[in-house]
Amino acid sequence: MKTIKYNITTLLLILLLAACNNDLDEMLYTEVTDDQLTYTNAYQATGVLYANMRELFDHHNWAGVQETSSDELVMPANASGWDDGGIYKRIHLHTWNSENEQMNAMWNSLYKGAINANRIISLLEENKIPLTDGLTKEGVLAEVKIARAFFYWLICDNFGDAPLVTSTGTELQAKSSRTELYQFIVSEVNAALPNLSEDNSRLLYGRFNKWAAKALLANVYLNAGVYTGTPAWQECIQQCDDVINSAKYSLNANFRDVFTTQNENSPEIVFAIPFEETVGGGFLFHMFSWHASLKAKANMQATPWGSGSAMAVPQFIDTYDPLDGRLADTWLMGPQFAADGKTPLLGAYDQAGKPLVFTKDIPDGLYTGESEGYRMNKFTVKMGALHNLDNDFPFFRYADILLMKAECLLRNGNPNEASTLVSQVRARAFKNNPAKATVTGNDLQQNSRYKYGYVEDYKLVDEGNTAPVQYGRLLDELGWEFAWEGHRRRDMIRFGIFTTKSWLSHKPNGDYRITFPIPQQTINSNPNLTQNQGY
C-alpha cells in the first residue's frame, strides 16, 4: 500500500442534514470555525475528501449495503452472534426502513464528503489555500468538483431524490429530483474535464485525473436510464473509448494482482481509494467475513469477529464455470489451514474442535453454522495483517471500462463487438482453458445462469418470477468479475431484477426499494424534507 497521509482532523460534521434540532442558532457542531480552518497546501485540502471516501467500506456503510442487498452476498446470524437487532437480515430481506443504521451511516458519509468539497471550493475561490508545485487554481478546483460529483453520484444512486447542497450556507435544503442530481453531476464533470491532468503517475494515484473522471462519467451514463428514464449508452461508450484510447491502462496479467496488498502499481486501476493499515484505515472485509480461527491462516495481529458472517449466496456460486479462475480467486472455500499450510484450523461453536471446512450451501439467509458459506478471498490478507488491510480499493478499473463499453454495445445492437471485449476480460480467468474464454454475441443475449428462487432448509422451494433476464449472460459476467467490489446492487437494478427476483430468503418487496429511505433523524431535523416514496 502506498502510504498517503491525509490530514483528517478537521472533517466537517453534517451541518445541514443530520442535526439534532431545527434551531440553527443554538447548534454547536464544532469549535473550529471556517476562519480557523487552514491548509498549508492544496494536497492537504483535497486529501480530506479522499479520506472521507474511506468511511464507505465498513459493513454498516455503502460497501456492505451494495453487496448484501443483492443476490451475491448475505450476512446471516450464527452461534457467535451477528444478529445485531436484525440490521443485516433486513438488508437481505429488503425490509429495511429509515431507522436502519446503515442508511444513516451511508447518508452521513456521502454528505460529509459533498459538504467538505463545498467548503474547500469556497476556500480555493477565496484564495485561502496555497498553491505550490506548479498546481493551478483551475486544476485543483476541477479535481475537488469531480470529488464532489463522485459523492453526489452515490447519493443519487442510493437515495434518488435528495438535497443538492453546493454552497457553505446554513439553509436547510429541500430535495432535488434524481434527474436534477444526474444533470448536475454530468454538467460538473464535463465542465471540469478540460482542467484535469492527463497524467496517471504516482503523484496522481488515488486522485481524480482526467481518466478517472471519465470513468466516473461513464458509470453515471451507464445508469442514466435508471436515474432519468432516458438511456445514454452512446455517451457511455464515448467516455470508455477515451480511456481506452489514452493507452494509459491495461488489464493485469493475473486477476489476483489487482487486489493484492501492494496493488498500487497495478496498470488496471483507473481510480483507487488508498488505505493504509495504521494511518489510513477502514478497509476490513476480512474482519466481518473470516472466522476467528483464520487468524492463524495469516498470522494476523487482529482476530476476525466471531465465526464471521459475510458469505456468498450459494445460488450465485452455482453460476460459475468450475474452471473459471475467478471462483477460487474470489471465494475462500474448503478445508482451512494455519500459515504452515498443514495444521488444520478448528471450529469453536457448533463445530467446536472439528476441522474448519467452508461449504457452499447454507440453509437460508437468516442463520447458518459456523463453517457454512464461502468467505472473502478476493483481497489478499497479508501475513501479520492488522484490523485494517493495507490493500487499496480499485473503485474504477480497466476491466470495468471494457465491460461498460461491452454492455452499451450489446444494448445498442452490436453483440459481436461486445463479445470481443468480454472475451478479452475472460481470457485471464481461463488461462489453462483458453477456448472457454471466448463468448459470442449470441451467448451474451441468453438468460442468466442464476437459478433464482426462495430457499428453505438448503432447498429451493419457490422459483418466484421465472421471466428470462434480458442480456442475463452479460449480467453473469459482471457478477464473476466484480464480486466484492460494490457493483452488484447497481447492476441488478439496471438489468431489472433487483425488485423482481427471489434468492435465498429474499422475496420481492416493492419496486420502490431501488432507492433507500432518507434516515429518520435527518427527516426529523429538516422540515423541508419529505421521505422517499414507499417509506
Image: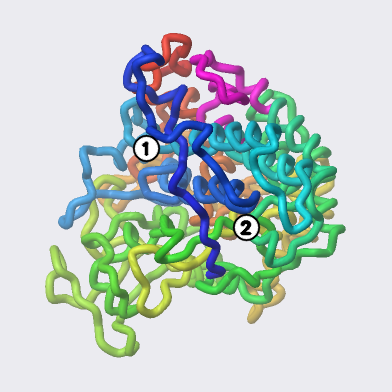
The residues bearing labels 1 and 2 have C-alpha atoms spaced at a distance of: 26 Å
Whether 244 is drawn above or below 461: the answer is below
Q: Looking at numbered disc 1 in the image, what kind of residue is underneath it?
A: Gln
Please tell me which residue is depicted at 33% across the width and 64% down the height of the picture: 387
Give the labeled residue for mark 1.
Answer: 102
Circle 1 Cα neighbour tier, 10 Å, few/some/many (<14 / 14–19 / ≥20): many
Q: Position of residue 420 (x, y in %)?
A: 80, 60
Residue lying farthest to the top in this orientation: 527
Amino acid of disc 2? Gly
Residue 21 location (% of width, % of height):
33, 16
Highlighted magenta segment, given as a residue range: 153-182
Q: Which of the labelled discs sits on residue 206, or is there none?
A: 2
Q: How is the image coloured?
A: rainbow
Q: Nearer the viewer, residue 266 or 119?
A: 119
What residue sits 43% from the left and 47% below the top? Answer: 9
User: Relative to 277, does residue 238 appear above or below in the rendering?
Assistant: above
Which part of the image, by quadrant, shows the C terminus?
top left
Quarter holding residue 262 = bottom right
